[in-house]
Amino acid sequence: MVSDSELIERLREFLLTSDLNTTTTAIVRRKLEEDFRIDLTEKKAFIRQQVDLFLQSQQENEKEEEEEREEEEAKNGKAEADGTDSEEDEGDEEEEQEEDVGRNAKKKKKKTANKDRKDNKRRGGGFTKLCSLSPQLQEFVGVAELSRTEVVKQLWAYIREKKLQDPENRRNIICDATLHTLFGVNSINMFQMNKVLSKHIWPLDEAGPAKSEQKEKQRKQEREEGSDELKPKEKKRKGSSGFLAPLPLSDALVRFIGTGESSLSRSDVVKRMWDYIKQNNLQDPADKRRIKCDEKLKELFEVDSFNGFTVPKLLTSHFIKAEQ
């Protein structure tokens, strides 16, 4: 069994030697599957999160190098202005220059790699290809389409400009009104931020997260059903209805929704479910992925709590299949 730490180590090694102009998350996942000889389909979200963290760390390194360069330039400028000519100062300067040789060599290597990445960004593709943005993210960045890496870069530039990192733990971001509109919370961990941000960034050929979820669920359903369970025409008809077609709801779900509607699409029900969870503050403050059930949810799902990712699965039994 491969551990998450082993996956992360190999993922970062691969990305450090890859052309980010052409590399995609799918390519990364296939490479990891090939190296470890395992199926990582269930790790898609985890791999995407680690890719985001890698891209973010690269931008952090670029920022640190830029700050160090500015400090060195300021220091050199001050030394020239002072005009110190003593032998002791000259000796100190020579020692500093010798100590900087190794660091400068490393920085030069990183600078070259960063320049290649910037050239890749201008060309577009892979992690740097243009994506569609949610209305909230469009309002934040001012454009309708932007690459994921550029979105993350602008977001961190805003965080630093507004000094929104918690002084006691710089991994935590204190959300002002603008970020609260985007993330829906008062504070957020930098690792969680990447995950939430993904909900606002979609491939150009998709209308949003609902369509992505629909395609993934449809593929999973087709795999589970198998190629021989339905006749070709029946399978095509069922697949074409997708998750946007209205389906009959169980009596319990009709009572929960409370609008009198007896049929709704899967995506509509999931959306209403999340609206209910957020309106009633049912997410665990310590872990937003955990949902603490109130009486209505306990009656519907018969559990005290559940993981947010399992909402579609929990709802499955409440959709009544049409008779064939």
Image: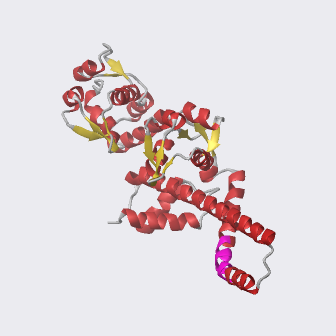
Give above or below for 130 relative to 99: above
Residue 134 shows in this picture = no
Q: Residue furthest top?
A: 260
Q: In the displayed structure, does residue 296 sit left or right of residue 108?
A: left
Give the camera-side residue of 311 and 237: 311
Give above or below for 110 relative to 231: below
Quarter of the image that includes the N terminus = bottom left
Say which residue appears at 57% left-offset and 66% top-offset.
16
Q: Magenta region's main secondary structure? A: helix
Q: In the displayed structure, does residue 4 sit left or right of residue 91?
A: left
Q: How many marks?
A: 0
What's the magenta region?
98-107
Q: In the displayed structure, does residue 172 sit left or right of residue 261?
A: right
Is 36 magenta? The answer is no
Say which residue appears at 52% left-offset and 45% top-offset.
164
Say which residue appears at 35% left-offset and 66% top-offset.
2
Give the camera-side residue of 141 and 177: 177
Residue 1 shows in this picture = yes
Is 106 magenta? The answer is yes
Q: In the displayed structure, does residue 124 sit left or right of residue 191?
A: right
Q: Quadrant of residue 225?
A: top left
Percent from the top left, x then y, of residue 102? 65, 80
Percent from the top left, x then y, of residue 127? 59, 52
Give above or below for 195 relative to 71: above
Percent from the top left, x then y, of residue 24? 56, 54
Give the camera-side residue of 151 and 299: 151
